[in-house]
Image (cartoon, grey):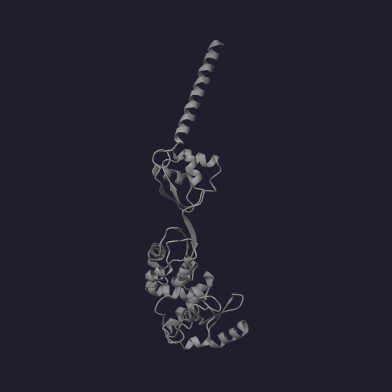
Amino acid sequence: MKTFLRLFFIFFVSAALLAAATFFYATTQLQPVNPQQTQKTNFVVPTGQSVSVIGSRLQQAGLIRNALLFREQVWQLHLGSKIQAGTFMLSPSMSTNEVAQNLTRGTNDLWATIPEGWREEEIADMLASQQLPNFDKQEFLNVAKNDEGFLFPDTYLFQRTATADSIYHVLRDTFDKKVTNNLAGDIQASGYSLHDVITLASIVQREARQPQTMKIVAGILEHRLQLGGGLNVDATLQYIHGYDPVFQTWWAEPTSDLKLSTSPFNTYKYKGLPPHPIDNPGLNAINAVLHPTRTDYLYYVTDRQGTMHYAKTLEEHNSNVQQYLR
Protein backbone atom coordinates (compact mmCIF):
# COMPACT_ATOMS: atom_id res chain seq x y z
CA MET A 1 0.00 0.00 0.00
CA LYS A 2 2.83 2.34 0.90
CA THR A 3 4.54 1.53 -2.37
CA PHE A 4 1.34 2.34 -4.27
CA LEU A 5 0.95 5.64 -2.46
CA ARG A 6 4.56 6.48 -3.13
CA LEU A 7 4.18 5.72 -6.83
CA PHE A 8 0.94 7.69 -6.96
CA PHE A 9 2.61 10.64 -5.26
CA ILE A 10 5.54 10.50 -7.68
CA PHE A 11 3.15 10.29 -10.65
CA PHE A 12 1.03 13.16 -9.33
CA VAL A 13 4.06 15.38 -8.72
CA SER A 14 5.51 14.54 -12.14
CA ALA A 15 2.23 15.29 -13.87
CA ALA A 16 1.92 18.56 -11.99
CA LEU A 17 5.47 19.52 -12.89
CA LEU A 18 4.89 18.59 -16.53
CA ALA A 19 1.68 20.61 -16.61
CA ALA A 20 3.43 23.57 -15.01
CA ALA A 21 6.34 23.29 -17.44
CA THR A 22 3.95 23.03 -20.41
CA PHE A 23 1.96 26.03 -19.18
CA PHE A 24 5.15 28.03 -18.64
CA TYR A 25 6.45 27.07 -22.09
CA ALA A 26 3.16 27.93 -23.79
CA THR A 27 2.88 31.20 -21.92
CA THR A 28 6.43 32.11 -22.87
CA GLN A 29 5.90 31.16 -26.50
CA LEU A 30 2.84 33.41 -26.70
CA GLN A 31 4.80 36.43 -25.53
CA PRO A 32 6.28 39.00 -27.95
CA VAL A 33 9.38 37.98 -29.84
CA ASN A 34 11.06 41.26 -28.84
CA PRO A 35 9.13 43.75 -26.65
CA GLN A 36 11.66 46.49 -27.45
CA GLN A 37 11.37 46.18 -31.25
CA THR A 38 8.28 48.31 -31.83
CA GLN A 39 8.95 49.22 -35.47
CA LYS A 40 6.13 47.83 -37.60
CA THR A 41 6.47 46.01 -40.89
CA ASN A 42 4.04 45.06 -43.65
CA PHE A 43 2.69 41.51 -43.50
CA VAL A 44 0.52 40.39 -46.43
CA VAL A 45 -2.19 37.75 -46.07
CA PRO A 46 -3.23 36.49 -49.54
CA THR A 47 -6.83 35.53 -50.22
CA GLY A 48 -7.63 31.99 -49.07
CA GLN A 49 -4.37 31.33 -47.21
CA SER A 50 -4.81 28.83 -44.35
CA VAL A 51 -4.20 29.67 -40.68
CA SER A 52 -1.39 27.10 -40.57
CA VAL A 53 0.45 28.74 -43.46
CA ILE A 54 -0.12 32.21 -42.02
CA GLY A 55 1.32 31.03 -38.70
CA SER A 56 4.40 29.55 -40.35
CA ARG A 57 5.00 32.75 -42.29
CA LEU A 58 4.57 34.88 -39.16
CA GLN A 59 7.15 32.75 -37.35
CA GLN A 60 9.57 32.91 -40.29
CA ALA A 61 9.14 36.70 -40.36
CA GLY A 62 10.06 36.91 -36.67
CA LEU A 63 6.65 38.25 -35.67
CA ILE A 64 5.60 35.35 -33.41
CA ARG A 65 7.53 32.67 -31.55
CA ASN A 66 5.51 29.56 -32.35
CA ALA A 67 3.31 28.84 -35.38
CA LEU A 68 1.54 25.87 -33.74
CA LEU A 69 0.53 27.93 -30.71
CA PHE A 70 -0.62 30.72 -33.04
CA ARG A 71 -3.00 28.24 -34.67
CA GLU A 72 -4.22 27.08 -31.24
CA GLN A 73 -4.75 30.68 -30.16
CA VAL A 74 -6.78 31.44 -33.30
CA TRP A 75 -8.88 28.32 -32.67
CA GLN A 76 -9.52 29.12 -29.00
CA LEU A 77 -10.51 32.72 -29.78
CA HIS A 78 -12.73 31.63 -32.72
CA LEU A 79 -10.84 33.95 -35.09
CA GLY A 80 -10.34 31.54 -38.00
CA SER A 81 -13.23 32.90 -40.07
CA LYS A 82 -12.46 36.50 -39.11
CA ILE A 83 -8.89 36.74 -40.38
CA GLN A 84 -8.86 38.93 -43.48
CA ALA A 85 -6.77 39.05 -46.60
CA GLY A 86 -4.71 42.19 -46.96
CA THR A 87 -1.66 44.05 -45.69
CA PHE A 88 -1.22 44.44 -41.93
CA MET A 89 1.24 46.49 -39.89
CA LEU A 90 2.78 44.15 -37.30
CA SER A 91 5.82 44.27 -35.02
CA PRO A 92 7.83 41.78 -32.92
CA SER A 93 6.66 43.70 -29.82
CA MET A 94 3.14 42.28 -30.23
CA SER A 95 2.05 39.13 -28.41
CA THR A 96 0.63 36.22 -30.37
CA ASN A 97 -2.85 37.23 -29.22
CA GLU A 98 -2.31 40.81 -30.40
CA VAL A 99 -1.05 39.61 -33.78
CA ALA A 100 -4.06 37.31 -34.21
CA GLN A 101 -6.49 40.08 -33.26
CA ASN A 102 -4.80 42.55 -35.62
CA LEU A 103 -5.34 40.19 -38.56
CA THR A 104 -9.12 40.57 -38.06
CA ARG A 105 -9.31 44.37 -37.78
CA GLY A 106 -9.24 45.60 -41.34
CA THR A 107 -6.22 46.28 -43.47
CA ASN A 108 -4.23 49.00 -45.12
CA ASP A 109 -5.72 47.78 -48.41
CA LEU A 110 -9.01 47.96 -50.25
CA TRP A 111 -10.75 45.63 -52.66
CA ALA A 112 -11.47 46.95 -56.14
CA THR A 113 -13.25 45.02 -58.90
CA ILE A 114 -12.56 45.86 -62.53
CA PRO A 115 -15.35 44.34 -64.65
CA GLU A 116 -14.69 42.65 -67.97
CA GLY A 117 -15.26 44.88 -70.98
CA TRP A 118 -14.42 48.23 -69.38
CA ARG A 119 -12.48 50.93 -71.19
CA GLU A 120 -9.42 52.54 -69.62
CA GLU A 121 -11.51 55.62 -68.80
CA GLU A 122 -14.03 53.55 -66.86
CA ILE A 123 -11.27 51.91 -64.87
CA ALA A 124 -9.73 55.30 -64.12
CA ASP A 125 -13.09 56.75 -63.03
CA MET A 126 -13.75 53.85 -60.68
CA LEU A 127 -10.29 53.97 -59.09
CA ALA A 128 -10.56 57.74 -58.66
CA SER A 129 -13.74 57.18 -56.63
CA GLN A 130 -11.99 54.83 -54.19
CA GLN A 131 -10.12 55.75 -51.01
CA LEU A 132 -6.78 55.96 -52.79
CA PRO A 133 -5.34 59.36 -51.84
CA ASN A 134 -2.23 58.93 -54.01
CA PHE A 135 -4.10 57.85 -57.13
CA ASP A 136 -4.21 60.40 -59.94
CA LYS A 137 -6.73 59.70 -62.70
CA GLN A 138 -4.92 61.60 -65.44
CA GLU A 139 -1.60 59.99 -64.57
CA PHE A 140 -3.23 56.56 -64.90
CA LEU A 141 -4.68 57.44 -68.30
CA ASN A 142 -1.28 58.71 -69.42
CA VAL A 143 0.64 55.57 -68.45
CA ALA A 144 -2.08 53.23 -69.77
CA LYS A 145 -2.88 55.06 -73.00
CA ASN A 146 -1.20 52.46 -75.22
CA ASP A 147 -2.48 49.45 -73.29
CA GLU A 148 -6.22 49.35 -73.93
CA GLY A 149 -7.10 45.65 -73.81
CA PHE A 150 -4.09 44.67 -71.71
CA LEU A 151 -5.32 45.82 -68.28
CA PHE A 152 -6.62 42.57 -66.88
CA PRO A 153 -10.14 42.72 -65.39
CA ASP A 154 -10.25 41.08 -61.97
CA THR A 155 -10.81 41.74 -58.27
CA TYR A 156 -7.70 43.28 -56.77
CA LEU A 157 -6.41 44.14 -53.31
CA PHE A 158 -4.61 47.48 -53.53
CA GLN A 159 -2.69 49.24 -50.79
CA ARG A 160 -4.38 52.52 -49.95
CA THR A 161 -1.08 54.26 -50.63
CA ALA A 162 -0.99 52.87 -54.20
CA THR A 163 -0.22 55.31 -57.00
CA ALA A 164 -1.57 55.36 -60.56
CA ASP A 165 1.71 53.93 -61.83
CA SER A 166 1.82 51.07 -59.32
CA ILE A 167 -1.80 50.10 -60.02
CA TYR A 168 -1.18 50.20 -63.77
CA HIS A 169 1.73 47.79 -63.36
CA VAL A 170 -0.39 45.42 -61.22
CA LEU A 171 -3.04 45.24 -63.96
CA ARG A 172 -0.48 44.86 -66.72
CA ASP A 173 1.53 42.23 -64.83
CA THR A 174 -1.62 40.25 -64.13
CA PHE A 175 -2.42 40.28 -67.84
CA ASP A 176 1.07 38.99 -68.66
CA LYS A 177 0.75 36.23 -66.08
CA LYS A 178 -2.75 35.03 -67.00
CA VAL A 179 -2.71 35.64 -70.75
CA THR A 180 0.72 36.30 -72.29
CA ASN A 181 2.37 33.46 -70.35
CA ASN A 182 -0.43 31.00 -69.55
CA LEU A 183 -2.03 31.11 -73.01
CA ALA A 184 1.14 31.43 -75.07
CA GLY A 185 0.68 28.03 -76.72
CA ASP A 186 -2.97 28.64 -77.59
CA ILE A 187 -2.18 32.07 -79.00
CA GLN A 188 0.57 30.69 -81.21
CA ALA A 189 -1.70 27.86 -82.42
CA SER A 190 -4.49 30.33 -83.28
CA GLY A 191 -2.48 31.93 -86.05
CA TYR A 192 -3.20 35.38 -84.64
CA SER A 193 -0.80 37.74 -82.94
CA LEU A 194 -1.44 38.54 -79.28
CA HIS A 195 -2.54 42.03 -80.29
CA ASP A 196 -5.09 40.68 -82.77
CA VAL A 197 -6.40 38.10 -80.29
CA ILE A 198 -7.06 40.79 -77.69
CA THR A 199 -8.52 43.19 -80.26
CA LEU A 200 -11.02 40.58 -81.46
CA ALA A 201 -11.70 39.44 -77.88
CA SER A 202 -12.51 43.01 -76.85
CA ILE A 203 -15.22 43.09 -79.52
CA VAL A 204 -16.56 39.66 -78.53
CA GLN A 205 -16.67 40.87 -74.93
CA ARG A 206 -19.07 43.69 -75.84
CA GLU A 207 -21.12 41.72 -78.38
CA ALA A 208 -21.85 38.63 -76.26
CA ARG A 209 -22.19 37.81 -72.58
CA GLN A 210 -22.12 34.04 -71.96
CA PRO A 211 -19.08 31.82 -72.67
CA GLN A 212 -20.95 29.68 -75.20
CA THR A 213 -22.41 32.61 -77.11
CA MET A 214 -19.01 34.29 -77.05
CA LYS A 215 -17.56 31.27 -78.86
CA ILE A 216 -20.29 31.37 -81.50
CA VAL A 217 -19.89 35.12 -82.01
CA ALA A 218 -16.11 34.71 -82.21
CA GLY A 219 -16.63 32.09 -84.92
CA ILE A 220 -18.98 34.40 -86.83
CA LEU A 221 -16.57 37.33 -86.68
CA GLU A 222 -13.70 35.10 -87.75
CA HIS A 223 -15.85 33.90 -90.65
CA ARG A 224 -16.45 37.51 -91.72
CA LEU A 225 -12.71 38.23 -91.58
CA GLN A 226 -11.97 35.17 -93.72
CA LEU A 227 -14.49 36.35 -96.32
CA GLY A 228 -12.62 39.67 -96.48
CA GLY A 229 -15.53 41.82 -95.40
CA GLY A 230 -16.05 44.22 -92.54
CA LEU A 231 -16.80 43.05 -89.04
CA ASN A 232 -19.90 45.29 -88.97
CA VAL A 233 -20.21 45.44 -85.17
CA ASP A 234 -21.96 48.12 -83.14
CA ALA A 235 -19.48 47.86 -80.27
CA THR A 236 -16.83 49.64 -82.31
CA LEU A 237 -19.31 52.43 -83.08
CA GLN A 238 -19.91 52.76 -79.35
CA TYR A 239 -16.16 53.06 -78.87
CA ILE A 240 -16.05 55.87 -81.43
CA HIS A 241 -18.92 57.70 -79.74
CA GLY A 242 -17.27 57.57 -76.31
CA TYR A 243 -19.00 58.87 -73.21
CA ASP A 244 -22.65 59.78 -73.62
CA PRO A 245 -23.63 62.50 -71.10
CA VAL A 246 -27.35 61.94 -71.71
CA PHE A 247 -27.32 58.22 -70.89
CA GLN A 248 -24.24 58.62 -68.66
CA THR A 249 -22.45 55.64 -70.10
CA TRP A 250 -19.50 54.87 -72.35
CA TRP A 251 -21.58 52.27 -74.19
CA ALA A 252 -24.75 54.03 -75.35
CA GLU A 253 -26.81 52.54 -78.18
CA PRO A 254 -25.11 53.77 -81.39
CA THR A 255 -26.95 55.99 -83.81
CA SER A 256 -27.05 55.20 -87.54
CA ASP A 257 -24.97 58.25 -88.47
CA LEU A 258 -21.98 56.69 -86.69
CA LYS A 259 -21.77 54.23 -89.60
CA LEU A 260 -20.62 57.17 -91.71
CA SER A 261 -17.74 57.97 -89.37
CA THR A 262 -14.25 58.06 -90.88
CA SER A 263 -12.75 56.76 -87.65
CA PRO A 264 -10.54 53.69 -88.27
CA PHE A 265 -12.67 51.96 -85.62
CA ASN A 266 -15.71 52.05 -87.91
CA THR A 267 -15.97 48.36 -88.75
CA TYR A 268 -18.92 49.08 -91.06
CA LYS A 269 -16.72 51.24 -93.27
CA TYR A 270 -13.33 49.51 -93.03
CA LYS A 271 -12.44 45.87 -93.43
CA GLY A 272 -10.45 43.81 -90.95
CA LEU A 273 -9.76 44.50 -87.31
CA PRO A 274 -9.74 48.00 -85.78
CA PRO A 275 -6.34 49.49 -84.83
CA HIS A 276 -6.40 48.23 -81.23
CA PRO A 277 -8.76 46.76 -78.61
CA ILE A 278 -11.86 48.74 -77.68
CA ASP A 279 -11.99 47.54 -74.05
CA ASN A 280 -10.28 45.16 -71.64
CA PRO A 281 -11.68 41.65 -72.19
CA GLY A 282 -11.78 38.79 -69.70
CA LEU A 283 -10.58 35.22 -70.07
CA ASN A 284 -13.91 33.93 -71.42
CA ALA A 285 -13.80 36.31 -74.37
CA ILE A 286 -10.10 35.63 -74.98
CA ASN A 287 -10.65 31.87 -74.89
CA ALA A 288 -13.62 32.28 -77.24
CA VAL A 289 -11.32 33.83 -79.84
CA LEU A 290 -8.70 31.13 -79.29
CA HIS A 291 -11.28 28.33 -79.43
CA PRO A 292 -14.27 29.62 -81.44
CA THR A 293 -17.34 27.61 -82.37
CA ARG A 294 -17.28 27.49 -86.14
CA THR A 295 -20.67 27.52 -87.87
CA ASP A 296 -22.20 28.61 -91.17
CA TYR A 297 -23.70 31.66 -89.49
CA LEU A 298 -22.75 35.14 -90.61
CA TYR A 299 -25.18 37.20 -88.53
CA TYR A 300 -26.45 37.44 -84.99
CA VAL A 301 -28.84 39.62 -83.05
CA THR A 302 -29.58 39.83 -79.33
CA ASP A 303 -33.21 40.21 -78.33
CA ARG A 304 -34.44 42.33 -75.44
CA GLN A 305 -34.20 39.38 -73.04
CA GLY A 306 -30.55 38.84 -73.91
CA THR A 307 -31.06 35.73 -76.05
CA MET A 308 -28.99 35.55 -79.24
CA HIS A 309 -30.46 34.55 -82.59
CA TYR A 310 -28.26 33.55 -85.52
CA ALA A 311 -28.68 33.61 -89.28
CA LYS A 312 -26.82 32.35 -92.34
CA THR A 313 -28.16 34.93 -94.77
CA LEU A 314 -28.94 38.63 -94.65
CA GLU A 315 -32.58 37.84 -95.35
CA GLU A 316 -32.76 35.55 -92.30
CA HIS A 317 -30.97 38.17 -90.22
CA ASN A 318 -33.39 40.93 -91.23
CA SER A 319 -36.26 38.63 -90.34
CA ASN A 320 -34.73 38.08 -86.87
CA VAL A 321 -34.34 41.84 -86.41
CA GLN A 322 -37.99 42.39 -87.30
CA GLN A 323 -39.15 39.58 -85.06
CA TYR A 324 -37.03 40.20 -81.97
CA LEU A 325 -36.24 43.91 -81.96
CA ARG A 326 -39.15 45.72 -83.61
Residue 276 appears in which quarter of the rendering?
Answer: bottom left
Quadrant of the drawing holding the N terminus: top right
Drawn side of residue 239 relative to residue 37, left or right: right
Q: Is residue 318 at all visible to an observer of this figure?
A: yes
**In this figure, what is the number of numbered marks?**
0
**Where in the figure is residue 281, as x and y percent of width and height?**
46, 70
Residue nearer the viewer, 150 or 196:
150
**Where in the figure is residue 322, as x and y percent of width and height?**
61, 86
Residue farthest to the front, as pictured = 133
Whether 245 is drawn above or below 47: the answer is below
Drawn side of residue 247 relative to residue 55, left or right: right
Whether 298 is drawn above or below 130: the answer is below
Whether 65 is drawn above or below 227: the answer is above
**Where in the figure is residue 205, as x and y percent of width and height?**
49, 73
Drawn side of residue 183 relative to residue 233, left or right: left
Residue 176 appears in which quarter of the rendering?
Answer: bottom left
Q: Is residue 119 at all visible to an observer of this figure?
A: no
**Where in the figure is residue 116, as x and y percent of width and height?**
49, 68
- Which residue does the image show at 51% across and 44% down from the upper left? 101
Quadrant of the drawing holding the C terminus: bottom right
Residue nearer the viewer, 13 or 30:
30
